[in-house]
Image (cartoon, rainbow, N blue to C red):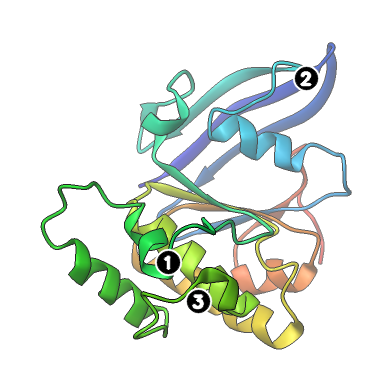
Amino acid sequence: MTLELDRIAITRAGAPLVALSAHIAPGEVLTLMGPSGCGKSTLLAALIGALPDAFALSGRVRLNGQDITALPTEARRIGILFQDAVLFPHLSVGGNLGFALPRQTPDRAARIEAALADAGLNGMAERDPATLSGGQRARVALMRTLLAEPRALLLDEPFSKLDAARRAQMRSFVFDRARAKGLPVLMVTHDPDDARAAGGAVVDVRGAPVSL
């Protein structure tokens, strides 16, 4: 899969906010940096089809050559990870992972167990998410996203609330799995270390290269 942002422009009340063209290859990470309020998260909202009414979007979003600009969120198959690992508190760890799978999935239990094993969380299917560490919760959130078989992955400051050691581990965990699945990745971050670990191009919301 490739993710293409073709002359994407976002305005608010006629004032320009974001202007970006980019081509993200399978397994590649494009990092977007800039100060708070410059439009980074607004761009991610536009890419998943959730741009607030106060903003206007022009340009085209394409996944593997298909124009998805006008598709509803659920039809785009773009996964997103946020600063907080948003897990359902009323579901077990396994239930959270299973939420990403269609009910009729024949090997549902096996796929959940395989995801837990890949995340280093063997035997934790029945655990309450509230009992997990921050790093464990982040891994469950990523595996749930990947079980939904997205065609691209967006990262909105996903490592910012982890301590330094866990942050380094999660960077490797996320980037390795995205590359293994050939997913184009767009990451928003304030941390130059995140950008360096991603290893791809780094730009601001106006498309200008960022020097680290």
SS state under label 2: strand
In the displayed structure, 20 sits above or below 27; it is above
The answer to whether residue 182 is seen in the rendering is no
Identify which amino acid the numbered label 1 is placed on: Ser
Identify which amino acid the numbered label 2 is placed on: Thr
Q: Residue at x 52, y 23 (%)?
A: 60
- Mark 1: few, some, or many residues within 10 Å (few <14, many ≥20)? some
Mark 3 or 2: the one toward you: 3
Pick whichever, 138 or 203, lies toward us.
138
- Left/right placement of residue 102 relative to residue 160 reads left
Residue 48: which disc?
A: none
Q: Which tag, 1 or 3, sits closer to the chain's start?
A: 1
Pick whichever, 206 or 137, lies toward us.
137
The answer to whether residue 139 is seen in the rendering is yes
Kindly check if marks 1 and 2 are in contact, taking CB atoms under 8 A apart as contact. no
Residue reaching furthest to the top: 14
Residue on which the image places disc 1: 92
> Residues under labels 1 and 2: Cα distance?
41 Å
Pick whichever, 134 or 179, lies toward us.
134
Q: Which tag, 1 or 2, sits closer to the chain's start?
A: 2
Q: Which tag, 3 or 2, sits closer to the chain's start?
A: 2
Residue on which the image places disc 3: 173
Residue 19 percent across, percent down from the top left? 73, 30
Q: Residue at x 79, y 66 (%)?
A: 191
Residue 190 percent across, percent down from the top left? 81, 60
> Residues under labels 1 and 3: Cα distance?
22 Å
Q: Residue at x 75, y 69 (%)?
A: 161
> Residues under labels 3 and 2: Cα distance?
35 Å
Residue 137 percent across, percent down from the top left? 56, 71
SS state under label 1: loop
Residue on which the image places disc 2: 11
In the displayed structure, 129 sits above or below 79; it is below
